[in-house]
Amino acid sequence: MKSTNQKLHHTHGRKLLLGLSIFLLLGGLAPERSTRANPLSVTRYLTLIDEDGSQHYKSFTCLPKDIQAGEVVSYQPKEIQNITVAKKLVAMKARCQNGKLVDAKRREIRFFHPSCWGNPPPDYVQIRQRENQEVAELKKRYTIIEFACNPMTQ
């Protein structure tokens, strides 16, 4: 009969081998090329570290092509890191299901980019009203992740 130490060593060896296999299958996690000029572009696979220190990967291969996991959803004060699409999806316990991105309640997730201006156009009130209506309609059917405007451009 194996000792507890041997079983523990064997289990860790399997986890390491599994992690290495996943890493190699994913092509070393090389970032994807994007047509958007986005310095925050990251891969669609996220490395997550559990409380016990173990690593695993979360896949968001169904993320829309025009959305990058490293894009900022919400801007925070300098002391706090900005909230990215990836962080938001992990917090929502999102996953891919049948090729669609869904939240923990299996409701499809959609993204919304509002208009952002440094100097607003003359009809900005109408634009905001139209966008607010659009978001309200989308929220009836989907979980919406709405991007914030960069405060440096406001």
Image: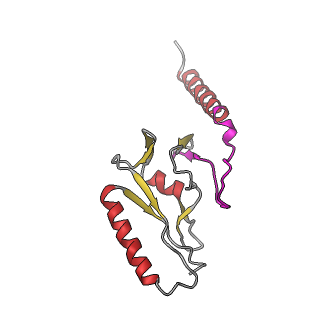
Residue 117 among magenta residues? no
In the image as oriented, which residue stretches furthest toward the left? 140
Q: Residue furthest top?
A: 1
Given residues 13 and 7, the one toward you in this image is: 13
Left or right placement of residue 4 versus residue 92 in this view? right
Taking the spot 33% from the left edge, 67% from the top edge, the residue there is 136
Q: Image point 33% across, 64% down: which residue?
A: 137
- Exactly how many numbered labels are in the figure? 0
Placement of the C terminus among the 4 image quadrants: bottom right
Q: Nearer the viewer, residue 88 or 77?
A: 88
Q: Position of residue 52 (x, y in %)?
A: 53, 43
Q: Would you identify the image quadrant in which residue 38 lies?
A: bottom right
Q: Main secondary structure of the magenta part?
A: loop
Above or below, 78 against 143 in this view is: below
Image spot of residue 104 (x, y percent): 37, 48
* 76 left or right, relative to 105: right
| 95 vs 78: above or below | above
Q: Nearer the viewer, residue 88 or 78?
A: 88
Image coordinates of residue 98 in percent, x first then y, are 42, 38
101 to 129, vertically: above or below: above
**Residue 143: x percent and y percent?**
37, 56
In this view of the protein, which residue sits in the foreground, 93 or 44?
44
Magenta stretch encompasses residue 36: yes
Identity of the residue furthest to the bottom in this view? 122
Whether residue 56 sits left or right of residue 39 in the image: it is left
Q: Quadrant of residue 10?
A: top right
Q: Which portion, as a residue range, is magenta?
A: 25-51
